[in-house]
Amino acid sequence: MNPKRPYNTPLDAAAILEFKALLEEARTRLQKELETIAKPNPIVKGDWQATVPHFEGDADAEEDPEEAADKFEEYELRRAQEQSLEEQLVKINRALERIEVGTFGLSIKTGKPLPLEQLRANPTAECEVGIEDTV
């Protein structure tokens, strides 16, 4: 794959490939981490669902109320963690999409080049520092 180089981008092809490798590595790491606490939603692409933790003795007909409370608490922790990881994964996928279409390194709001220092600190950055980063 030869990433496109959009007009005005401050990045050369080597830098873009470096960011692509970094982002792909981060995506793989996040997906592996998500797989330990969640499963992909079969209906909504890119969505994950936290799984219910299993404890020893789960096959018992009657569940100890304390164990049930522990299981619920663990599930809530998994949900929060899953949401955070999923948000990171979405940002990474959007950055990789920008690489594919040739707009990586440009603000999605203004079209201006993002500073290299900003991209090195946050490769998923979509806007200049100081501009509201909402999509």
Image (cartoon, grey):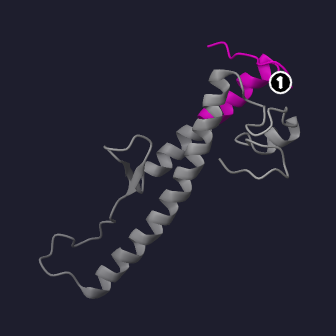
Magenta span covers which residues?
Answer: 1-25
Q: Quadrant of the N terminus?
A: top right
The x and y percentages for residue 38 are 39, 54
Q: Residue furthest left?
A: 61
The answer to if 18 sits in the magenta stretch is yes
Residue at the bottom extreme of this rendering: 65
The residue that label 1 is drawn on is 9
> Is the residue marked by circle 1 packed among few (<14), some (14-19), or many (20+) residues within 10 Å?
some
Q: Position of residue 49 (x, y in %)?
A: 38, 55
Residue depicted at 73% across the width and 50% down the height? 133
Magenta-drawn stretch contains 119: no
Left or right for 120, reference 92: right
- SS at mark 1 in the image: loop
Query: Looking at numbered disc 1 in the image, what kind of residue is underneath it?
Result: Thr
In the rendered image, the vertical position of residue 48 relative to residue 96, given as above or below:
below
- Compared with residue 92, is residue 54 higher up or lower down, i.e. above or below? below
Q: Position of residue 102 (x, y in %)?
A: 70, 21
Q: Residue furthest top?
A: 2
